[in-house]
Image: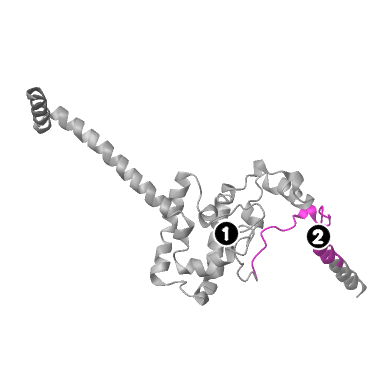
């Protein structure tokens, strides 16, 4: 018992002695433990803001874009794979995720000042909001799309010949990115009047019939041919 008491007294003396070396050691240890706690808390808070529940906690999102998402193949499909809000709007890599979170922080102002707090306001701003998101995805080469869709993993043989041809000519070489052609796949499009389509027939393909042209394409071609014929007759 006396030995235990002596050990405890020795430990207490060490802890209360203001020796420079021990103080530095304790500061280092304390800093390390504090850093671990801070990192854990920060990462936990970050992940909490990266859930669909957090995204739709604002009625601006829940009653507008989220309701639209529930009616698309990204929400319900035969394979049961569901894309949530963060899957499409937040990159998976940590550095890109932090950059996106910092960028999205300004959206808090929209919530505070009620920029789109009604359906009417949302629809009035819809084109502007869509343009911002299209430009962001264009600039980062559709990074969020690539959270799930990998061009390297595409089985072109299972795509329509038309899609495989376009992907081979433009997506794989990097001449185009996902958002160029795939707007409005999870949410309704704004009024697109005056908006250039994402993918237009390149000059080198003018007059060429693309593989697996749809009935609509064939009908459009027939109408154009008839218009040219009428124009030539006049």
Q: Which residue is mark 1?
A: 134
The colour mode here is one colour
The residue shown at (80%, 64%) is 216
Q: Secondary structure at mark 1?
A: helix
* Cβ atoms under marks 1 and 2 closer than 8 Å: no
Q: Position of residue 121 (x, y in %)?
A: 50, 75
| Whole-number angstrom distance, CA of label 1 to CA of label 2 | 27 Å
Packing grade of label 2 (10 A; few <14, some 14-19, many >=20) is few
Q: Secondary structure at mark 2?
A: loop
Q: Nearer the viewer, residue 185 or 41?
A: 41
The quarter of the picture where the N terminus appears is top left
Main SS of residues in magenta: loop
The residue shown at (67%, 62%) is 197
Q: Which residue is mark 2?
A: 214
The residue shown at (42%, 72%) is 114
Report the span colored magenta.
Answer: 194-222
């Amino acid at each position: 018992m006396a030995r235990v008491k002596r050990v405890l007294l020795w430990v207490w003396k060490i802890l209360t002695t203001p020796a420079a070396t021990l103080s530095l050691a304790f500061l280092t240890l304390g800093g390390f433990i504090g850093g671990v706690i801070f990192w854990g808390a920060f990462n936990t808070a970050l992940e909490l803001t990266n859930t669909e529940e957090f995204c739709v906690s604002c009625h601006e999102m829940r009653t507008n874009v989220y309701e639209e998402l529930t009616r698309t193949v990204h929400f319900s499909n035969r394979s049961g794979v569901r894309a949530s809000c963060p899957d499409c709007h937040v990159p998976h890599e940590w550095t890109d995720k932090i950059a996106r979170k910092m960028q999205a922080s300004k959206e808090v102002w929209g919530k505070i000042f009620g920029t789109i707090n009604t359906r009417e306001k949302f629809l009035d701003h819809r084109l502007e909001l869509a343009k911002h998101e299209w430009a962001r995805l264009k600039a980062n080469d559709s990074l969020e799309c690539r959270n799930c869709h990998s061009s390297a993993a595409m089985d072109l043989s299972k795509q329509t010949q038309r899609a495989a041809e376009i992907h081979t000519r433009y997506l794989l070489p990097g001449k185009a990115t996902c958002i160029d052609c795939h707007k409005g796949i999870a949410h309704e499009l704004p009024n697109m009047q005056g908006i250039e389509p994402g993918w237009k027939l390149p000059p080198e393909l003018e007059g060429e019939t693309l593989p697996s042209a749809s009935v609509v394409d064939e009908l459009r071609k027939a109408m154009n041919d008839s218009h040219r014929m009428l124009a030539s007759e006049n």
